[in-house]
Image: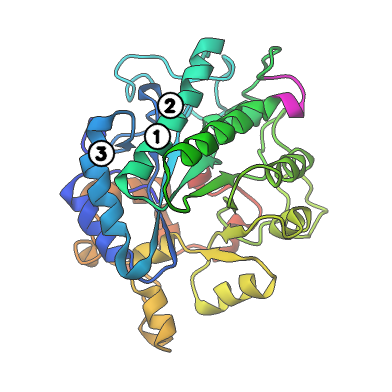
Amino acid sequence: MTEASGFEEGSITSDELRYFRMHSGGVGLFISPVANVSVSGKGFEGELAITDDRYLPGLTKMASAMKQNGTKAILQIFHAGRMSNSKILRGERPVSASSVAAERPNAEVPRELTGDEIDQIITDFGEGTRRAIQAGFDGVELHGANTYLLQQFFSPHSNRRTDKWGGDVDGRMSFALAVIKRCHEVIQQYADHPFILGYRLSPEEIETPGIRLADTLHLVDVLCGQPLDYLHISMGYAWRTSLNDQADTEPLILKIKRQVAGRLPLIAVGSVEKPADAEKVMAAGIDFVALGREMLREPNWVQKVAADDEAGIRYTISEQDLDELGITPAMWNFLIVRLKSAMHISNQPDYDKDQFDHKLAPHEGA
């Protein structure tokens, strides 16, 4: 849940700590806003960094703030790759698997990473995991979705390499597998208690060439054999059907569940707002239900559901309540620029909840 409220150089702020305390404590698992593992991996302003040991004191406070009432604290880590620009990177050109620009307005052509640089980023993911362990988090989630670097290596659009990091579908997943392997090794070396390693992915891309469902189902099959603790499927609508095959009406999450076949716990997310929405996901046999935008509007969603107080749940958000919700001006600007009416702003025109059934949500990248 991006909140864009960190200091410019990546340190955590007191506003963020307040936000974490307010929004944790009801859910079983709190997955943090993303933190970059490499200096070249910063994707937006106000983003957390986990690139150096100097961030450990703040990260320790962050883990503690997230662990209210037994909630498990998961630190999401990533490298933005080409989902950045030279302004955010202070004059440096963005990097990616290949020198291919994203198909979005004003996207810069990234610089292709060298083999040594790829090895260093794999090491950076491991070091980020070590810092998460030392800061007291209960796990890390590798953000391989929303067109960030892990996905860029898997995508035939952004990865045109002919070395061991590219080529066919198996070659393109080699970077993700190397990152998982390194993080697992670090967990074995440094964690003195069970430490969670999750992986987040986006099932399809709309670019041509791009990731298609057959690629993802193969990736899922391989990931189920890796030392992972869960898969998190990133979509703006939990029941989305194929973006590329309009004739296929089976929700993607059910196809993925069938491929997983019980080998790993599965997290579904996307426009889950009401208890009935969560119950629908649970009834389909999905292990975990994730709430995103709704948790911004209603930090006590879980507590109110448990108390049979659905009538007290907030399904809209007012600009007058932002401080009460711990939402900073920077975060609010990020939300309304990226998500607009999808935030259910109380005094503005609302959106059709099912609009993300057939298209990417704005926060899913491009």
The residue labelled by disc 1 is 128
User: What number is the disc on residue 300?
Assistant: none
Dot 2 falls on a residue whose secondary structure is helix
Residue 298 visible in the current orientation: no
- The three-letter code of the residue at mark 3 reads Leu
Q: Is residue 169 magenta?
A: yes
Q: Residues within 10 Å of mark 1 (few under 14, many from 20)?
A: many
- Taking the image as shown, residue 281 lies to the left or right of residue 344, namely right
- Residue hosting label 3: 56
| Residue range highlighted in magenta | 166-171
Q: Amino acid at mark 2?
A: Asp
Q: Is residue 185 above or below residue 251?
A: above
Q: Are marks 2 and 1 in contact (CB under 8 Å)?
A: yes
SS state under label 1: helix
Q: Between marks 2 and 1, how big is the CA–CA gap?
A: 6 Å
Q: Is residue 281 visible?
A: yes
- The residue lying at 47 percent from left, 63 percent from top is 291
Residue designated by label 2:
124
CA distance for labels 3 and 1: 10 Å
In the rendered image, the residue lying farthest to the right is: 247
Residue 140 rendering spot, x and y as whole percentages: 45, 46
Kindly identify the residue that appears in the image at 74 percent across and 19 percent down: 167
Q: From what the image shows, is residue 36 above or below residue 32? A: above
Residue 311 in the image: above or below residue 251: below
